[in-house]
Image (cartoon, helix red, strand yellow):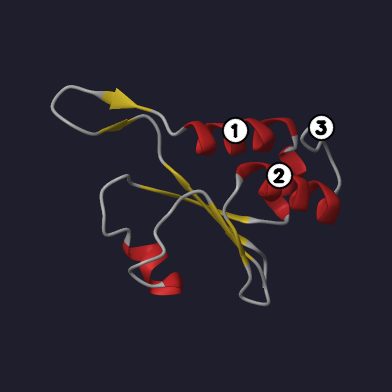
Amino acid sequence: MKPILFVLSMPFEDGPGKMWICSHCAMIEGALTVNPHWADQVDVRRVDFAKPRKAVVELLGEDNQWLPVLILDDEQTLTQPEAIINYLAEAFGGAAVHP
């Protein structure tokens, strides 16, 4: 099974007329852009901001809708953007987060 990476679809509305991005998801999207070969190795799923986030809930439960999240084969999850990027770089090659 490929790792599954959930990120928010951006921009999203949260409040009347207010558009936002998720800084953590934007960091992940940037890493995906500079490491395009990850697309062959990771199942990237972009989901809407509104909760419940059905696709996430189905895999992780109602209490675990924090995004971004990377779900690994052994059901381990990573939620910190730096940890996600560094894991993907180590597992599949490419650019990691500079220390």
Q: Quickly name the residue at label 1.
A: 27
Q: Residue at x 65, y 63 (%)?
A: 3
Q: Quickly name the residue at label 2.
A: 85
Q: Is residue 17 above or below residue 85?
A: above
**Residue type at tag 1:** Met
Q: Quadrant of residue 61?
A: bottom left
Disc ID at residue 15: none
Disc 1 to disc 3, how far (Cα)? 15 Å
Q: Earlier in the sequence, mark 2 or mark 1?
A: 1
Residue 35 point in image, percent of width and height:
75, 37
Q: Residue at x 81, y 30 (%)?
A: 98
Residue 12 point in image, percent of width and height:
31, 33
Q: Earlier in the sequence, mark 1 or mark 3?
A: 1
93 on left or right of 24: right
Residue 74 point in image, percent of width and height:
68, 77
Which residue reaches farthest bottom? 74
Q: Quadrant of the C terminus?
A: top right
Q: Quadrant of the N terminus?
A: bottom right
Which residue reaches farthest front? 99
**Residue type at tag 3:** Pro
Query: Which mark lies nearer to you, 3 or 2?
Result: 3
**Residue type at tag 2:** Ile
Q: Quickly name the residue at label 3.
A: 99
